[in-house]
Each structure stands twice: as structure tokens, then as C-alpha cells.
Amino acid sequence: MMQEQDNYQTFISRASEFIPQQRIITDYLRTLAYGTDASFYRLLPRVIVQVANENEVIRLMALATELEVPVTFRASGTSLSGQSITDSVLLSLTPDWKRYEILDDGHQIRMQCGVLGGDANRYLAPLGRQLAPMPASIDAATVGELPSITLPE
């Protein structure tokens, strides 16, 4: 147990070498708030790191692998099954993950993982397209990192 605690302290210390301190969260109140999603499950993350770009994710994943610290990703937190919570390290998206590109006259869309499903549909609407299926959380849920989506006719 002591080695595990040391691994988390080392993770926090080394992550702070390339992540600004204000994006590394360890205080009880904020970890409690992030420790739930739309499901009825609740876990208390040991540390939350708000990631702003792919390079940060790569470096944090390498660090977590080296220290054998489990990592869970969280975008909007709309999961109904608890897959966006953890009692370990939680990587949470900053608002920087919003780029998108409409391809092939609207037959495909390429998006970063922070694009809301409802926003994607608004981008596609002028072309007579939309994502499917349409979950009730479409305006709150992010789509996830996809190389591109080919939309049905």
C-alpha cells in the first residue's frame, strides 16, 4: 500500500513538470465532484489531470505505465454505466478538444474527442446530415476520438 501511495505522489510530482499546477487536482471536494458521472456509481479519484492536447496524453500515459498507475478518461461524464469514473488517475478533457472537419461533402466528419454530439449535428445540418443514433444526452455527451465517421445515406 505504501509503494502504491508513493507511485501516486511520484506521478503527481513528475506530471507537474509538464502540466500546469492548476490542471492537477487532488483536493477532496473537486475529486468528489469528478468521482461521479450520470450513473449511480461513485469513486474518488486520487488525482485528476485536465489534459489540453495529445502530447500531454501521450506523456501522461507513458508516466502512468512506468509507475503502474491505472488511468481512466473522462470527457463529459454522461456515462450511465460508470465508465468515466475511477479511484485512480482520471484524465479529464479541457475545452481545447473541439476541432472538427467535414469531409466528402458532408458524407464524413472528423472530430476531436471533445466535440458534443449536438454540435456535430449542427455542423452537419446545412448538408442534410446528422449522427445516428441520437441518445437523449446528445447535447451534453461528447462523441469521442474518431478518425472519421462515414454517415449513412
Image (cartoon, helix red, strand yellow):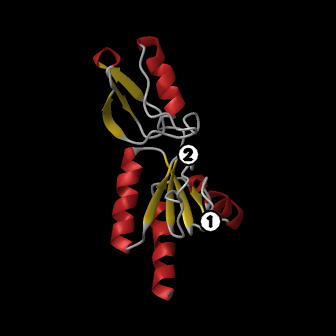
The image shows residue 139 at horizontal and vertical percentages of 58, 33
- Identify the residue at image location x=52%, y=38%: 135
Q: Which residue is mark 1?
A: 42
Q: Which residue is situated farthest in the right direction here?
A: 29
Cα separation between marks 2 and 1:
16 Å
Tell me where residue 66 sits by quadrant. Answer: bottom left
Q: Is residue 125 above or below residue 58?
A: above
- Mark 1 residue crowding within 10 angstroms, few (<14) / some (14–19) / many (20+): some
| Mark 2 vs 1: CB contact within 8 A | no
Q: Which residue is mark 2?
A: 76
Q: Nearer the viewer, residue 97 or 21?
A: 97
Quadrant where the C terminus sits is: top left
- Mark 2 residue crowding within 10 angstroms, few (<14) / some (14–19) / many (20+): some
| Element type where label 2 sits in the image | loop
Total number of numbered discs in the rendering: 2
- Which badge, 2 or 1, comes first in the chain's sequence? 1
Q: Is residue 119 above or below residue 49?
A: above
Q: Which residue is situated farthest in the bottom direction here?
A: 2
Q: Nearer the viewer, residue 134 or 4?
A: 134
Q: Which residue is situated farthest in the left direction here?
A: 104
Callout 1 amino acid: Arg
The image shows residue 83 at horizontal and vertical percentages of 49, 58
Q: Is residue 128 left or right of residue 32?
A: left
The image shows residue 34 at horizontal and vertical percentages of 62, 58
- Identify the residue at image location x=57%, y=53%: 23
Q: Is residue 121 above or below residue 74?
A: above
Callout 2 amino acid: Ser
Q: Which residue is situated farthest in the top direction here?
A: 126
- Identify the residue at image location x=47%, y=38%: 97
Q: Nearer the viewer, residue 71 or 131?
A: 131
Label of residue 32 in the image = none
| Element type where label 1 sits in the image | loop
